[in-house]
């Protein structure tokens, strides 16, 4: 008889671009190898250092549209003129292997996941202030001015939507935010 494997738990992390999701998640994942970060599909071009299959599955618009047509996404959304999506089969496989899976999604994707998987735990990361958010986004030096403006334009609606999340964490002091994340995810 095969060993019984308990299903993993599903977590969704959202927050405006530049708030520190990636930084926080890296620290969290280094400390908690029993969690796995999901790899999404995107039509965005890779940034320097990003690898296909590691950071994202980088697809053409045609490839992405085919996955939509074949109903292969658990959720997908257009964000800042690019398409992003999470494959159903990928999530099902990881959860059935007993992995606690983290999806890092925009707010549309996060709320769509909650509709189909109400057991998912939604966590929203807030900046200490708008000024600090903008300074982090610019300080990262990964986006053009146009891309920065597009990302800043969505912040108001993202913060309004944060009220529909299960937990909100302010990423002011990184260590403090990490502790709060651990309190929510490791209880
Ligand atoms: P996101 O993944 O949410 O887009 P990043 O993790 O790339 O954001 O962080 C954006 C920038 O802000 C990075 O340069 C990162 O080093 C910095 N950063 C993240 N968290 C903090 C923090 N608590 N205090 C100061 N800077 C931070
Ligand atoms: P970036 O281009 O900075 O990597 O990501 C831009 C935004 O897309 C971020 O808010 C990120 O959380 C979101 N994102 C990444 N993958 C997915 C996904 O699979 N689905 C959705 N809906 N959003 C995603």
Image: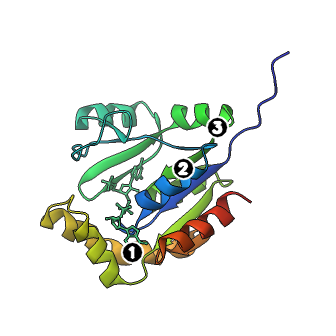
Q: Which mark is residue 157?
A: 1
Mark 3, other Cα within 10 Å: few <14 / some 14–19 / many ≥20: some
Above or below for 110 versus 91: below
40 versus 109 height, above or below: above
Q: Position of residue 150 (x, y in %)?
A: 22, 67
| Residue drawn at (61%, 70%) of the image | 180
Q: Position of residue 135 (x, y in %)?
A: 27, 76
- Asked whether disc 2 touches disc 1, contact meaning CB atoms under 8 Å apart, the reply is no
Sort mark 2 into few (<14), some (14-19) or many (20+) by Cα contacts within 10 Å: some
Q: Label 2 belongs to which residue?
A: 29
Percent of width and height locating residue 72: 46, 33
Q: Secondary structure at mark 3?
A: helix
| Quarter of the figure with the N terminus | top right
In the image, residue 92 sits, relative to residue 122, either above or below, namely above
Q: Out of 12 and 172, give the one closest to the viewer.
A: 172
- Which quarter of the picture shows residue 41? top left
Q: Residue at x 69, y 53 (%)?
A: 119
Q: Any mark on residue 72, and which?
A: none
Q: If you read the primary sequence from the N terminus, does the residue marked by circle 3 or circle 1 appear first?
A: 3
Kindly check if marks 3 and 1 are in contact, taking CB atoms under 8 A apart as contact. no
Q: As drawn, which residue projects farthest toward the right?
A: 1
Disc 3 vs disc 1: which is toward the camera? 3
At x 40%, y 44%, the residue is: 85
Could you tell me if residue 106 is visible in this image? no
> What residue is disc 3 on?
95
First in sequence, mark 2 or 1: give its number. Answer: 2
Tell me which image quadrant ligand 1 sits in.
Answer: bottom left
Indicate the quadrant containing the C terminus: top left, top right, bottom left or bottom right. bottom right
């Amino acid at each position: 008889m095969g060993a019984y494997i308990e299903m993993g738990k599903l977590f969704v992390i959202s927050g405006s671009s530049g708030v520190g999701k990636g930084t926080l998640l890296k620290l969290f994942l280094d400390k908690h190898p029993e969690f796995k970060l999901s790899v999404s599909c995107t039509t965005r071009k890779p940034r320097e250092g990003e690898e296909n299959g590691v950071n994202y599955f980088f697809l053409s618009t045609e490839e992405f549209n085919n996955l939509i047509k074949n109903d292969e996404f658990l959720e997908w959304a257009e964000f800042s003129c690019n398409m992003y999506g999470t494959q159903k089969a990928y999530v099902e496989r990881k959860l059935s292997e007993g992995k606690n899976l983290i999806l890092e999604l925009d707010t549309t994707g996060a709320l769509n996941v909650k509709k189909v998987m109400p057991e998912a735990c939604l966590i929203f990361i807030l900046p200490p202030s708008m000024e600090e958010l903008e300074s982090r986004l610019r300080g990262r030096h990964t986006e053009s001015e146009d891309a920065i403006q597009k990302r800043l334009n969505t912040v108001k609606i993202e913060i309004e939507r944060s009220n529909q999340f299960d937990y909100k964490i302010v990423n002011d002091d990184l260590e403090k935010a990490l502790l709060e994340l651990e309190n929510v995810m490791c209880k």
